[in-house]
Image: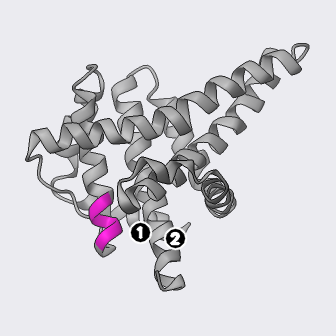
């Protein structure tokens, strides 16, 4: 948890954080423009993955930002939206007699698991920017399990942050992705360094 606090503090204390956060959040309110915000997050985590430092890059090369935003969106659709939808259907069908609150508890836990899965898939994809990496289901599930166990409190905080800002969905989406992608990249980068990869 201390690593998360250090990383988050370093991010917030960056003089460019407020304008970056505002720009990304506003873009997430508008379909298609959100690709630029996602591309920015892609670029930020790519820098972190390469040299292990948390930097806020410039908003430059819009065409590259857009393409990288599409890449992140594809990963989130395959490993985020589809599992969330499937989980909601299964919970509703198998546990139909549960109260509304109980369903929300199960679905909330499922959201945390899917968030961990999405981050793991994204880190794996960014390794080579090859979508075939997303087919390595066993490795991605193992990564997600390790990340879920080690960062459970961080995932709860990120999910809570998203719920707090949910009426302002642009802020909710951008803040959730920014924090959780930074944390997961930092975590997996540390494991790669220890493993000598």
Q: Is residue 12 above or below residue 25?
A: below
Assign a secondary structure to mark 1.
helix
Which quadrant would residue 105 be assigned to in this image? top right
- Report which residue position mark 1 lands on: 6
Determine if residue 185 is in view.
Answer: yes
Toward the viewer: 92 or 17? Answer: 92
Q: Tell me how far mark 2 sits from mark 1, CA to CA.
A: 6 Å
Toward the viewer: 105 or 87? Answer: 87
Determine if residue 22 is in view.
Answer: no
User: Chief secondary structure of the magenta span?
Assistant: helix
Q: Determine whether label 2 and label 1 are within 8 Å by CB.
A: yes
Q: Whole-percent x and y of residue 40?
A: 24, 46
Is residue 102 shown left or right of residue 30? right
Residue name at image x 62 percent, y 40 percent? 114
- Report which residue position mark 2 lands on: 2
Give the residues in magenta: 46-50
Label 1 crowd (10 A; few <14 / some 14-19 / many >=20): few
Assign a secondary structure to mark 2.
helix
Toward the viewer: 46 or 29? Answer: 46
Q: Whole-percent x and y of residue 58?
A: 11, 52
Number of numbered tags placed on the structure image: 2
Label 2 crowd (10 A; few <14 / some 14-19 / many >=20): few
Residue name at image x 78 percent, y 15 percent? 100
Image quarter in which the N terminus is found: bottom right
Residue 47 falls within the magenta-colored stretch = yes
Is residue 28 shown left or right of residue 107? left
Q: Whole-percent x and y of residue 107?
A: 71, 29
Residue name at image x 37 percent, y 60 percent? 128
Which quadrant would residue 68 be assigned to in this image? top left
Task: Check the image and name the residue furthest to the right.
Answer: 97
């Amino acid at each position: 948890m201390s690593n998360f606090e250090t990383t988050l503090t370093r991010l917030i204390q960056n003089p460019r954080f407020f304008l970056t956060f505002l720009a990304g959040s506003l873009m997430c309110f508008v379909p298609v423009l959100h690709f630029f915000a996602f591309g920015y997050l892609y670029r930020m985590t790519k820098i972190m993955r390469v040299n292990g430092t948390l930097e806020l890059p410039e908003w430059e090369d819009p065409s590259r930002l857009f393409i990288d935003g599409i890449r992140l969106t594809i990963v989130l659709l395959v490993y985020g939206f589809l599992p969330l939808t499937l989980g909601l259907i299964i919970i509703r069908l198998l546990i139909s007699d549960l109260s509304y609150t109980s369903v929300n508890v199960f679905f909330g836990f499922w959201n945390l698991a899917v968030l961990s899965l999405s981050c793991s898939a994204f880190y794996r994809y960014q390794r080579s920017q090859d979508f075939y990496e997303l087919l390595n289901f066993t490795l991605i599930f193992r990564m997600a399990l390790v990340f879920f166990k080690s960062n459970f409190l961080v995932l709860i905080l990120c999910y809570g942050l998203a719920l707090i800002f949910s009426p302002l969905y642009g802020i909710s989406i951008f803040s959730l992705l920014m924090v959780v992608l930074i944390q997961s990249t930092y975590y997996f980068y540390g494991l790669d360094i220890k493993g000598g990869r």
